[in-house]
Image (spheres, helix red, strand yellow):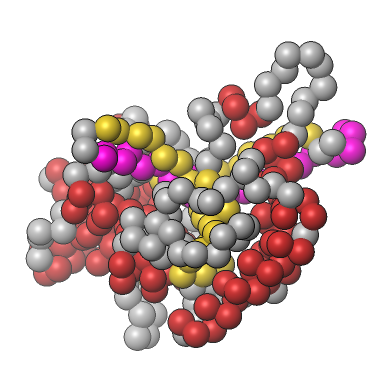
Amino acid sequence: MDAFQREALTVVYWHRLVTTEQVRRLVAPRLSPVTVRAKLAGLRRAGLADRIIREHRPRTWHVTPAGAEVVESAGTVDARAYRLPGTAVAHLLQEHTLDVVETGLTFVDAARARGDECGPLSWTPEVAHRFRDRAGDRRGVVIADAVLHYVLDEAGRRSQRTLFVELDRATMPVARLARKLAGYVRYHDHAPAGAGRRPPWRERYPRFPRVLIVLSGAEQHLLDRRLVDLRAHAQAMPVVSTAAGRVDMVATTLPRLRAAGPLERVAMPLLGDPRWVPVFGRLT
């Protein structure tokens, strides 16, 4: 197994499902697609990775149990708490998972172009954040589709940025998507019982991450309509609308991220001024 194959196996393990082209762009964008396909085929022959083939869809890769053991024994990344539960379920997860990877790739591409820092492992998929509800003993949980870390370099001044990424493939009602925003607000505002105890999020993040909603899975005009509807729902929900200044929330579409990159004016704030801003832009 050469260096490319080791890194590719790690990337596929970390993100669960990755297309051949995504592997190339994440690991070695200068390699030819033919070379990347040959190297991934080598991992398959070694029993470390396997592929999902669907008609008219990109070939998608996942690690085998043997491949997972190789990655975990290397210690390059933290062990994941799950395994891919078989190809039948993988088909159901595939489009959503690949769009999360594609979202991360837009940040990787931007970082390479600007000299910032964001690599193939700079986001962690499916991160759970647990807390107790203010009502008492009821437990709350917010599960981000990904937590993404980006180091922005502005004229030599480096700043750490973190995002909670929620991806929706136009599969759920906008009202339900808006309720996810309320979950992030409750997580931010949760105050544990006992004097001097810090909110749970402060144990994990130096500042509360910005919430980024990414819409995909439909034509652009339909995604734009959902975006406008999501902003309207956010402003109509008291628990969300009163969070301006405490929890930053923006939304965009995956086609916009692909076309312009996250550091252009591609994101709409869900509260306050509706003017488009960069994903990390200042909200007024």
Q: Quadrant of the N terminus?
A: top left
| Count of marks, rendered view | 0
Q: Find residue 261 and report its image quarter.
A: bottom left
Between residues 65 and 74, which one lies in front from this camera angle?
74
Question: At x 19% / y 53%, what residue is drawn?
Answer: 113
Q: Position of residue 228 (x, y in %)?
A: 60, 74
Instruction: Say if the magenta span includes residue 140.
Output: yes
Magenta span: helix, strand or loop, mainly? strand
Q: Which residues are magenta?
A: 135-154
Residue 115 left/right relative to 144: left
Q: Position of residue 44 (x, y in %)?
A: 26, 59
Between residues 273 and 240, which one lies in front from this camera angle?
273
Residue 201 visible from this viewpoint:
yes
Question: At x 69% / y 40%, what residue is drawn?
Answer: 187
Q: Position of residue 153 (x, y in %)?
A: 26, 39
Question: At x 63% / y 66%, what residue is drawn?
Answer: 231
In the rendered image, the residue lying farthest to the top is 195
Q: Find residue 180 and report its image quarter.
A: bottom right
Residue 46 visible from this viewpoint:
no
Q: Find residue 175 and report its image quarter.
A: bottom right
Residue 169 left/right relative to 75: right
Question: At x 32% / y 38%, what residue is drawn?
Answer: 151
Residue 15 left/right relative to 167: left
The correct choice, above or below, for 191 with respect to 268 in the image is above
The correct choice, above or below, for 273 with respect to 10 in the image is below
Instruction: Say if the magenta span includes residue 58.
Output: no
Q: Position of residue 19 (x, y in %)?
A: 32, 66
Between residues 264 and 10, which one lies in front from this camera angle?
264
